[in-house]
Amino acid sequence: MSHDRSPHPEKFGTVLGMAPGNVAVHSSDYPSADPAEYPGRSSYRSEIDGEYMGYKWQCVELARRWLYLNHGYVFDDVPMAYDIFRLRSVRVVKSGARLPLHAFHNGSPRHPQPGCLLIWNEGGEFHVTGHVAIVVEVLPDRVRIVEQNVGMHRWPAGQHWSRELPARTDAADGYWIQATLPGASILGWMLQTDDASHAVAHEPVDRRLFDIRAARLPQRGQHLAPWLDPRADDEAAFVAAMGGHKLTEAVDDQYRYFRLSDTALDELRRATNELHAMFMHATQAVLNDDGLLARFNIPPVLWPRLRASWDKRRGQMITGRFDFSVSAQGVKVYEYNADSASCHMETGKVQARWAAHFGCTEGLCPGDDLFDSLVDAWRGAGVDGVLHILYDRDMEEAYHARYMKAAAEAAGLTCKMIRGLAGLDWNAAGEVVDADGQPIRWVWKTWAWETALDQLRAECDADDRAPPLLATDAPRAAAPRLADVLLRREVMVFEPLWTLIPSNKAILPILWSIFPRHPYLLDSRFALGEGFGDAGYVVKPIVGRCGANISIFDKHATLVTETDGCFDDQDQIYQAYCRLPRVEGLNVQVCTFSVDGVYGGACVRVDPALVITTGSDLLPLRVVPDDSLLTAP
């Protein structure tokens, strides 16, 4: 994202000026980047002396590069620029030593100093990401800063700063810097210093606000009347799948819902945004390293395509789902379903319909914006032809596919539904076509990529030569299979092929190694070892769905429970055990949805068993004010 509205920005990479310390500041006008110079995502990595600085030419890259070149230290990897404000140390690159880093709120009596980091909050012009700049001069009425990704024009001769921001000192000697850009706000500044006077002291949040509470509505026979519209294709399919107008079989549970505080939802929104960025960072690390990629059990013949998919379609992921434990112990992510996630319709439509019919007026529905977010994502997806919706014969996939079709059509796309692989054939040019002879070029699918990979594995030779199904120059006698559709070069699939990486649980130990002890992550490893599993651990297949083939062990390494499935021949990872909160006899998992890389909505899935599976219920979730959650009986 570039924050520049002026015409004729300088070409991407152009040196706009030199910051103090002889540090170049570059234009980040991405549309003008030369594909020959920047052929793929890896070419956008900025490194000095083997140390990763960031993504060319983002604000974080300049801040880390400036600190390294001027002081020899860097701050740790962060998902978003505003996360820098939570860091409390920098790392000396040469020695590995840690030096203290302190944060000071905008308006602090501890004034900024040349060389400090200025941090913007998420919002307005810096929606989702926040922003960081280096302060190079501090004056009574203004500060001068250097930054990237804001302003793409060369500086005037003799100038060594990007822009000036108005500032003032109040009666209490507090120094205030004005953000100036629309909707933007400044959190404060960061100083590398041993003196913590006036530094931000993080006040602990009342951990009870992360407890999930259950509630029930009065039973007045509401469940006896229909409350979904059978004239809507997706709602009719939902009623057929559920065997009626309901979210669960038990009559009593049809009146039960769960309550989440505003504070907890704010943390989940932040976690969703940060974790998406962290998983993308880890995906890049995997695709840069054959040794790491080998752990994902993906046929090597497909590796070039994976990397091409990442380089060319990094920004074309529509949506994914995170699974969380949320309790007074914190917010912990279990995994990221970045490929073929489900539960969108229940979250974005059904739980709101339930509230309207059953008379639930408490709080807000956390799925209210999900559909509109999906529409916006489809508008920006670059689809320029018919979008074929491919779904299997599972009844859940029928309503999920229709819900996604409605979002794509609301974005102006033309869609065609294909159940199973019915009617698919070859044309004379060797393309896969639908029953009407329409070539399939754009696909959204409910199938997991792994289904197609299994077909690929069956054809791979020991020497990894390209199997026949990867050929794209001629039809074959047999009817097209799923892999024949999804793995053809001319077919653009959603979610893209690269989502195999963040969806594979082999990503979890890699994430932990990149972001050790991150508050949203659970310790995850490729093998059991000393100091691991003191509170128990979970064994997961690196590829699996719907809670299949999961084993939970207690702190004595005694098996507590396990689930069946068809993934028991997969490699495994080990994850520290973090039990789901148990509320009124149900284990409750919170799910959030990323849409176009940012938070889009939330829901809960519940089960008497310890592991959430495809048979677990999705009951309504309401977001309530903090005081309402704490004072409720």
Image (tube, rainbow, N blue to C red):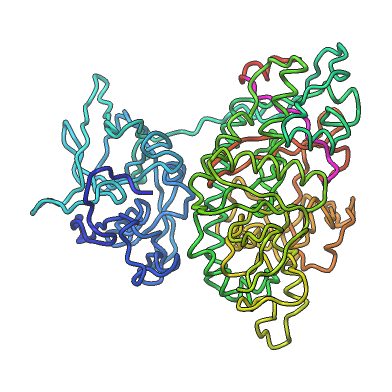
Residue 614 in the magenta stretch? The answer is yes
**Looking at the image, how many numbered discs can be counted on the residues?**
0
Q: Is residue 615 magenta?
A: yes
Q: Residue furthest left?
A: 157
Pinpoint residue 40: horizontal percent, then vertical percent.
44, 68
Residue 568 location (% of width, % of height): 85, 64
The vertical placement of 249 against 432, above or below, is above
Depth check: give the residue in front, 520 or 230.
230
The quarter of the rendered structure image containing the C terminus is top right
For the magenta stretch, what is the residue range?
613-624
Q: Can I make out residue 300 in this image? A: no
Task: Looking at the picture, tell me which residue is in the foreground, 425 or 306.
Answer: 425
Q: Residue at x 89, y 22 (%)?
A: 252
Residue drawn at 20 percent across, 43 percent down: 163
Q: Is residue 372 left or right of residue 260?
A: left
Res 582 quadrant in image: top right
**Residue located at (34% from left, 71% from top):** 37
Decide which of 221, 2 is in the foreground and name it: 221
Occupied quadrant, residue 238: top right
Residue 459 at x, y = what percent?
75, 79
Would you say 381 lies left or right of 465 here?
Answer: left
Residue 409 located left or right of residue 455 = left
Q: Quick check: can you spot residue 492? A: yes
> In the displayed image of the protein, which residue is found farthest to the bottom?
463
Instruction: Give the answer, above or below, for where 38 lies relative to 89.
Output: below
Q: Is residue 309 above or below residue 177?
A: below
Q: Position of residue 358 (x, y in %)?
A: 78, 17
* Location of residue 246 by image quarter: top right
